[in-house]
Amino acid sequence: MFNRLLLHRIVIYFLVLVLSALILIFSYYSINELTYLYQQNFSAKESQLNFLEAADVVTAKPNITLLFGGDVMLSRTVNAKMVAYNDYAWPLKLLAPTLEAADLSIINLESPFLENANYQVPSGSFSFRANPLSLEALLVSGVDVVSLANNHILNAGHKGIEDTIDLLTTNKIATVGAGLNEEAARAATLMTVNAWQIAFLAYAYPNDYSVATAERPGIAYMDHQNLAVDIKQVRDQADLVIVIMHAGEEYTTIPNTQQKRFAHEAIDLGADVVIGHHPHWPQSWEIYKDKPIFYSLGNLVFDQMWSEQTRHGVLARLVFQEDLSGQAELIPIIINDYGQADLWLQDKSEAQFWQLYDLDMPGEIIWP
């Protein structure tokens, strides 16, 4: 009886041991499996997060830098100097590092190119024609966009506009503000740079003979209804809409009513920036509804050596963030020897430059 009871207990203990062993084995593998599954799940989530972060990096727009210059005139005495020095890059080559450093550089071309012509223009003449060889100045300095909406672009007639657009386009410099008919003159120029889509529109104060029509080459003029239509057509296609205007009274730092009204309306209609020239002097600037307006940048290349104000100008360097906030810097320049642009003299204070125009030295120009 005792032996049978002992045997029974031994069997029970054995079964308990076996069951305990099975439980331990099951628990071990279950914990490892759960750990493995957790690690796999965590790795998947981590990979997903890394992918999303990488996607954010890819889709985020980098800051973009735009550099605007004023009036560039490559005729008259400027041409004579290029011929004398046998150097058609001469007018802008000293500014090339500054212009090339921007993502896009934009100027106003005040003199049409004309093929097979006499390029000797008397110093007192206001009818300009530029030798196509002087395109070298724009190429060497890295100019990307040229506004043609100004009061001199028809100085060489309809052929001058045709030659100018053909020459610039062939050399991969975009044009805006003039064309072989009204539709072409008013058409926006779209540029894609560093994931930014930028639209340029350009207009000048109207001279009857220079305004493009359905059948006549010419410029886009400052008509408020046209402005509304043009901005609306391009607004959804662009991250930035830049309006360039050639207007104002010459040789004054104060923008007139026409300039202010047109610039404000451009912003009201959806433009992000307004850049002006024509007065041959730098003029004041403002932030209007969180958007920058520069009424005149003055001369960039010109032979008006008869006054300190006309032989100086400014470059406007604008930097935009993805949310369209930004900041601007106005860079003083000096024109030497009847047509060569250079940065403002290092041995003079910038305050002296702004005193020439009785303008306050710009502080921090930011928006919004």
Image: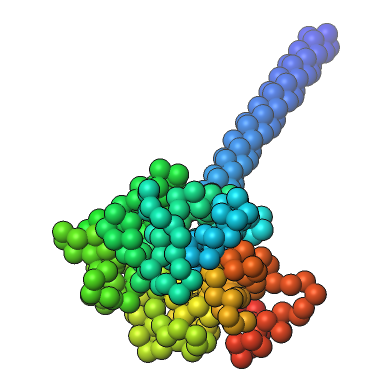
Q: Residue 152 lies in what quarter of the image?
A: bottom left
Applied colour scheme: rainbow
Drawn side of residue 308 relative to residue 272, left or right:
right
Quadrant that contains the N terminus: top right
Drawn side of residue 335 relative to residue 177, left or right:
right
Q: Is residue 11 visible?
A: yes
Q: Nearer the viewer, residue 364 or 28?
A: 364
Q: Position of residue 102 (x, y in %)?
A: 59, 57
Q: Position of residue 201 (x, y in %)?
A: 36, 64
Q: In the rendered view, would you say 268 is above or below 255? A: above
Residue ID at (64%, 35%) = 43
Looking at the image, the residue that sits furthest to the left is 215
Drawn side of residue 14 relative to residue 279, left or right:
right
Residue ID at (45%, 83%) = 250
Q: Position of residue 330 (x, y in %)?
A: 61, 73
Residue ID at (67%, 81%) = 353
Q: Nearer the viewer, residue 339 or 331?
A: 339
Q: In the rendered view, would you say 304 is above or below 73? A: below
